[in-house]
Image (tube, grey):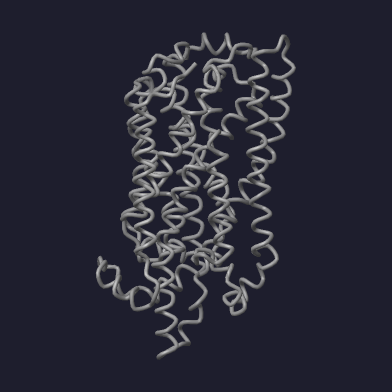
Amino acid sequence: MYTFSNKLRLGSFIAMGLGFIFLVIGFVSAPSTVEEAKAMVAVHDDGHGGGHAEAADAHGVAEGHGAEAAHGDEHDASHDEHLLHQLQNRPWSALYVAAFFFFMIALGVLAFYAIQRAAQAGWSPLLFRVMEGITAYLVPGGIIVFVILLLSVLHMNHMFVWMDADTVASDKLLQGKAGYLNPTFFLIRAAIFLGGWIFYRQYSRKLSLAQDESDDNSNFVKNFRWSAAFLVFYLISESMMSWDWIMSLDPHWFSTLFGWYLFASMFVSGITVIAMVTVYLKSKGYLEQVNDSHIHDLAKFMFGISIFWTYLWFSQFMLIWYANIPEEVTYYIARFQDYKLPFFGMLVLNFVFPLLVLMNSDYKRVNWFVIMTGIVVLFGHYLDIFNMVMPATVGDQWYIGFPEIGGILFFGGLFVYWVFTALTKAPLQPKRNPFIEESTHFHY
């Protein structure tokens, strides 16, 4: 049975405490008036200034979609209000990016776990308890994300511009999407998604533990059937979630590849965390049966899904850029103009780095190398979510400060605390999984 070390527990509490303080500072520092917003821009101007009007058009924010026809005082007032909303969105957006990032790690692990169950994989049962521990975060992480979405519906922020009735009233495109993009239906869908994901996780975990105490394989067979059925629900719900929670931040933009693209990001992030937690537990004397071949296979998945992510990224980018349709291409123009470092840095971290360091088969068996690679990959996919959310919500008024660092610290600490607490609730090695012997003697 795993014992949660006091040092790790203390570290997670310190991270949560510091993160909470930084987030509070970020929210308190947000401007409440146009004058405060202008003063803040003057202080924090880092060379992006002068592009607010262009950003309003590029990001699809509807207050100024007819900006070319508006001049004088009316235009200035619209510009100033838009700037105020961007700065007020910044702590909310930083909170949302971090909350969604750590939640999507658990959701990616859940998909990988269900695939292993449905495929009846022989190599991975020794890692099931690790996966079940990580997916335990779905409950607190999902609740927090839902609360943020609920507060958005209650107009506590301006991240989702289609939630503003006045904006919809002056925007024909949003009026055409109102049947799907309306606050009530939005929250109902979110509740269905979260309920289905959490139900499967809890029920599959129950069957997994029951199998250890059973004298037959009935619980294993039930888990196989539920996992196969869940994957159908997951593929549908994950795509719709990506449209709702991320893509609708840019309500004038769409991509038919976006669901798969987000899935690839969460999938490789989840597998990376499985590898890192497994290596950590082995370093502490647990999971003695896990060998270098298990780590090697996890690292192979890290490498392979990184290439798959790159394929989807390029496919989405190339088709939109080549077609040059204004409603679509502005998504990338905004990121090229205002997010050069995080945008192109993300490509290096998520494609070039894994390609170079994980190509060698021997490196996949070196534990410290897998940890180092995992940290870089996770940071790269945090930037991926950052690039999805921030341009739509804060425009060019972004920089790394208290709310961004606070979000990572708080949710990172909460994630570590919740996952490693869950790992203490059951033995780390399943007893009666029919494939446990195959997993124990697995060698690549």
Q: Which residue is drawn at 58% across and 58% down?
A: 150
111 relative to 218 in the view: left or right: left
**276 lies left or right of 151:** left
Tag count in the figure? Answer: 0
Left-right relation of 65 to 52 = right
Looking at the image, residue 143 sits to the left or right of residue 321; the answer is right
Q: In which quarter of the image is residue 335?
A: bottom left
Residue 32: x and y in percent read 40, 72
Q: Is residue 230 above or below residue 237?
A: above
Q: Which residue is drawn at 34% across and 45% down?
A: 18
Up-down relation of residue 208 to residue 237 (above or below): above
Figure check: 319 above or below 88: above
Q: Residue furthest bottom?
A: 72
Q: Position of residue 176 (x, y in %)?
A: 67, 71
Across and down, in percent, residue 98 comes to 44, 48
Q: Position of residue 334 (x, y in %)?
A: 41, 65
Instruction: Determine the residue positioned at 54% across, 57% down.
Output: 247
User: On screen, 110 above or below 310?
Assistant: above
Identify the image quadrant of residue 75. bottom left
